[in-house]
Image (cartoon, rainbow, N blue to C red):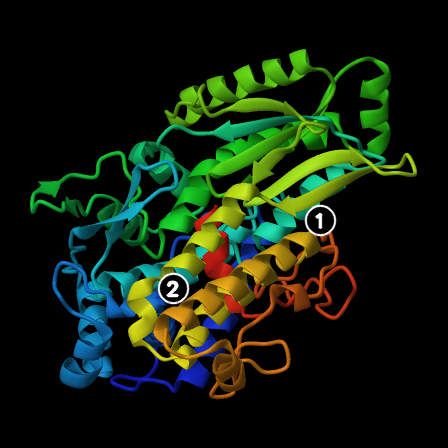
């Protein structure tokens, strides 16, 4: 079918959004209705003007649009010098005539908590738009194949859904006791391109699309010292399409455990029958490359499943399970996943409950960030400016951890932030008395200036996150579910943008 707009006519962003969503709904419906279907003519959708315009809006609206790749082109350069439409028209022409070539990504370094560093690859703005267009077309197709146990970097899903499923399975009546904390050694540095391309080709038959995916994978990396390195077994972190490709790759794990769950452990009476026979029941919960396997059985059963995971990773994905970081833990001892410390405890009335509490490393991380924002060098700023930087951190962190037993932690964090701000004010105004400081900066038990009040995390309402299971509303399944229904409603967050950043950082 012909999906192009009339020659040289670019739609409005509103019309483009509706057009792209219409394409996505059709692709998702076709993929869902026929699990064996391979799509042969989707490259035209990538080159469609509406797709490229929506891709530009999403890339340019991202904070990373201000960061240039190896060609030194930023959003400002495109908007003020080149012009958005000429820029997109040139990109579209290069895609259609086959002259498009992905440029190497620029290497960037982010320090990790353990003292090591994580290497990111920053594509050029032009490549980011092309990757976003690719993602807009491929994501609704592969979303039909992804499994409910996968939560990372998928539309409509978030880290709290993964925590909610773990809480659901470890609580009564399921009572899964043993936890395998999985860690894949250098996951994104050991993605086998041949395996990944075979997985993409299970759904995509269009050779132009496959060549475009391969071009992004093999673009290379300009390292910090200036050398050019090949990316033969790497999915560069930082690319727009990288999370989708990583999910496609790691869905082999999901498929393995989902097949066993569907064939041997469903419905519930089969799990009960296995328990009576002394056989283990187990289920995996994955968020990107972090995953846990919950086991109802013995430690020996968990050890056997861990060995099975290692063999599966080596045989199918050419990856290695880290023996040092992969642990088997009992739920009574607790474990940390996505920033939450999850542990079963017995209450005073004898009832056993599973608590999800902000972990000590997550609390230490946000306290360190507050300390950096209120250090001695920031006294050149006004109190209002400092409050504008501290408040989003406190509000976003509290919004992320509000779905757990977090009230005491929020009070502790609020107390810490209060005294950090008091210390900051004393440093900025060393000659003022306490009486003058209280009159200038302290309101009714709050620190304020210019109408900005220091946010107190203790004011965040704490509640249990609703476990939504497999029935989660996404932009692509709105014709299947009722978004207003109790099980399908979209969960909202305060300061959603920062919550997303916190989710990615903790994962």
For the residues labelled 1 and 2, the Cα–Cα distance comes to 39 Å
Q: 364 or 8: nearer the eye?
A: 364
Using residue 340 as the reference point, say whether residue 245 is left or right of it.
left
Q: Nearer the viewer, residue 460 or 275?
A: 460
| Residue 15 seen in render | yes
Q: Secondary structure at mark 2?
A: helix
For marks 1 and 2 on the same chain, the one whose residue lies earlier in the sequence: 2
From the image, state whether disc 1 or disc 2 is nearer to you: 2
Residue shown at 32% from the left, 31% from the top: 190
The residue carrying mark 2 is 373
Tally of marks: 2
Toward the viewer: 182 or 392?
A: 392
Which one is nearer the viewer's eye here, 201 or 61?
A: 61
Q: Which mark is residue 469?
A: 1
Picture quarter with the N terminus: bottom left
Q: Which image quadrant is residue 95 in?
A: bottom left
Q: Residue at x 32, y 47 (%)?
A: 237
User: Residue visible at 45% across and 84% down?
Assistant: 14
Around disc 2, counting alpha carbons within 10 Å, would you say few (fewer than 14), some (14 to 19), or many (20 or more)?
many
Compared with residue 79, is residue 52 higher up or lower down, i.e. above or below?
Answer: above
67 sits left or right of 173 in the view: left
Which percent across, then down, holds residue 137?
42, 61
Point out which mark residue 83 bears: none
Instruction: Tell whether 87 sits left or right of 239.
Output: left
The vertical placement of 4 against 27, above or below, is below
Relative image position of residue 260 (x, y in whole percent): 66, 27
Residue 235 in the image, given as x and y percentages of width and height: 31, 42
Q: Quadrant of residue 413?
A: bottom right
Regarding residue 479, the answer to whether it shows in the image is: no
Residue at far right of view: 349
* Residue drawn where x is 73% and y is 51% of the image: 467
Q: Position of residue 455 (x, y in %)?
A: 56, 72
């Amino acid at each position: 079918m012909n999906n192009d707009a009339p020659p040289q006519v670019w739609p409005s962003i509103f019309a483009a959004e509706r057009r792209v969503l219409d394409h996505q709904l059709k692709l998702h419906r076709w993929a869902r209705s026929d699990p064996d279907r391979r799509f042969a003519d989707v490259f035209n959708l990538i080159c469609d003007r509406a797709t490229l315009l929506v891709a530009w809006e999403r890339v340019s609206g991202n904070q990373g649009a201000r960061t240039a790749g190896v060609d030194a082109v930023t959003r400002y350069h495109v908007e003020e010098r080149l012009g958005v439409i000429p820029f997109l028209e040139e990109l579209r022409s290069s895609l259609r005539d086959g002259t498009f070539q992905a440029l190497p990504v620029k290497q960037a370094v982010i320090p990790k908590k353990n003292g090591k560093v994580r290497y990111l690859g920053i594509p050029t703005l032009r490549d980011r738009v092309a990757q976003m267009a690719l993602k807009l077309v491929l994501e609704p197709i592969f979303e039909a194949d992804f499994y409910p146990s996968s939560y990372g970097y998928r539309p409509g899903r978030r880290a709290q859904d993964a925590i909610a499923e773990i809480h659901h399975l470890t609580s009564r009546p399921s009572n899964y006791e043993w936890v395998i904390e999985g860690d894949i050694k250098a996951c994104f540095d050991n993605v086998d391109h041949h395996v990944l391309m075979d997985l993409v080709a299970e759904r995509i038959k269009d050779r132009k699309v496959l060549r475009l995916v391969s071009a992004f994978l093999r673009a290379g990396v300009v390292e910090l010292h200036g050398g050019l390195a090949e990316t033969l077994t790497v999915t560069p972190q930082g690319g727009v399409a990288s999370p989708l490709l990583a999910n496609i790759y790691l869905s082999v794990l999901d498929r393995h455990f989902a097949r066993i769950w569907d064939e041997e452990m469903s419905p519930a009476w089969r799990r009960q029958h296995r328990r009576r026979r002394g056989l283990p029941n187990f289920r995996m919960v994955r968020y990107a490359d972090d995953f846990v396997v919950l086991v109802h059985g013995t430690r020996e059963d968990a050890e056997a499943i861990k060995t099975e995971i290692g063999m599966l990773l080596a045989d199918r994905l050419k990856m290695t399970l880290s023996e040092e970081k992969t642990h088997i833990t009992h739920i009574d001892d607790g474990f940390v996943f996505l920033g939450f410390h999850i542990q079963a405890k017995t209450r005073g009335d004898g009832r056993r409950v599973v608590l999800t509490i902000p972990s000590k490393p997550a609390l230490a991380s946000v306290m360190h960030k507050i300390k950096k924002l209120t250090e001695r060098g920031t006294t050149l700023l006004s109190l209002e400016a400092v409050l504008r930087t501290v408040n989003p951190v406190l509000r976003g962190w509290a919004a992320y951890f509000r779905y757990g037993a977090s009230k005491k932690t929020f009070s502790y964090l609020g107390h810490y932030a209060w005294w950090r701000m008091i210390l900051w004010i004393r440093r900025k105004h060393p000659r003022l008395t306490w009486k003058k400081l209280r009159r200038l900066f302290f309101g009714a038990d709050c620190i304020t200036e210019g109408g900005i009040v220091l946010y107190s995390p203790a004011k965040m309402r704490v509640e249990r996150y609703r476990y939504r299971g497999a029935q989660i509303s996404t932009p692509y399944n709105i014709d299947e579910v009722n978004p207003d229904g109790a099980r399908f409603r979209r969960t909202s967050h305060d300061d959603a943008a920062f919550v997303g950043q916190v989710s990615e950082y903790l994962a």
